[in-house]
Image: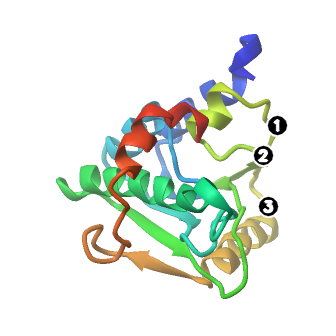
Amino acid sequence: MNSVKIRDEEEFTTNLLENQWPDTVQLDIATGYFNLIRKYQKKLIHQPPPSPTITILMASEEANGFYQGNGLLRYVPYVYTYYVRNFLRKINTMYNPITIRYYNRPNWSFHGKGIWLQTSEYYLTMVGSTNFGYRSVYRDNEAQLVIVTKNDQLKKKFQSEFDHLIEHSHKIRNWQTDLPRIPLLIPFIANIFRSLF
């Protein structure tokens, strides 16, 4: 709700990614449309030691809601591929415990979104409408719910929820070979219209 100067979600997520929980052991993020704002990217890439294990789950081109769309819409999945390529380029230049996974289940689209954060004592999950991208943070009105628990049974259920999501995903090991080629105009479109994605 940045359009009306309400930035609670952005501030909360930024603080969360700054590792305000020093005993965090695992951080999982899901987004249907990967276009993390720069602030979130920096917080993820520059985690202070000891860094948690970080997994980011996103839609593959085939699982993107715009896949095989009409007209120019068919190029939208490549815009998100361009953004993840740039992110992977940044994290591949240094040791980083970040893993990118591509959701790809035949005939399914992927719109999962949320944060699952596990510490030695607590489990936090954040669910709602945000994709953690420019459009979500700066243009759209989004709503989130944060649940924090110490209950072991509930912690297992939250983790099994994310584990179920990644069942139909594969790890992107190399941005040069594991991601599809991008049409020539995509970098231009992705950079000019970043706030729309």
Helix, strand or loop status at disc 3 = loop
State if disc 3 and disc 1 touch (CB < 8 Å). no
Location of residue 107 by image quarter = bottom right
Tags 3 and 2 touching, CB below 8 Å: no
Residue at the farthest front position: 71
User: Dots 2 and 1: beta carbons under 8 Å?
Assistant: yes
Q: Which residue ends up furthest to the left in the rendered image?
A: 93
- Residue displayed at 69% across by 30% down: 9
Q: Which mark is residue 121?
A: none
Residue indicated by mark 2: 129
Q: Which residue is mark 1?
A: 143
Disc 3 from disc 2: Cα separation: 25 Å
Percent from the top left, x then y, of residue 149? 77, 52
Position of the N terminus, as image quadrant, is top right
Q: In the rendered structure, which amino acid carries the disc numbered 2? A: Ser
Q: Which residue is mark 3?
A: 151
Residue closest to the eye, 180 or 39:
180
Mark 1 against mark 3, which lies toward the viewer?
1
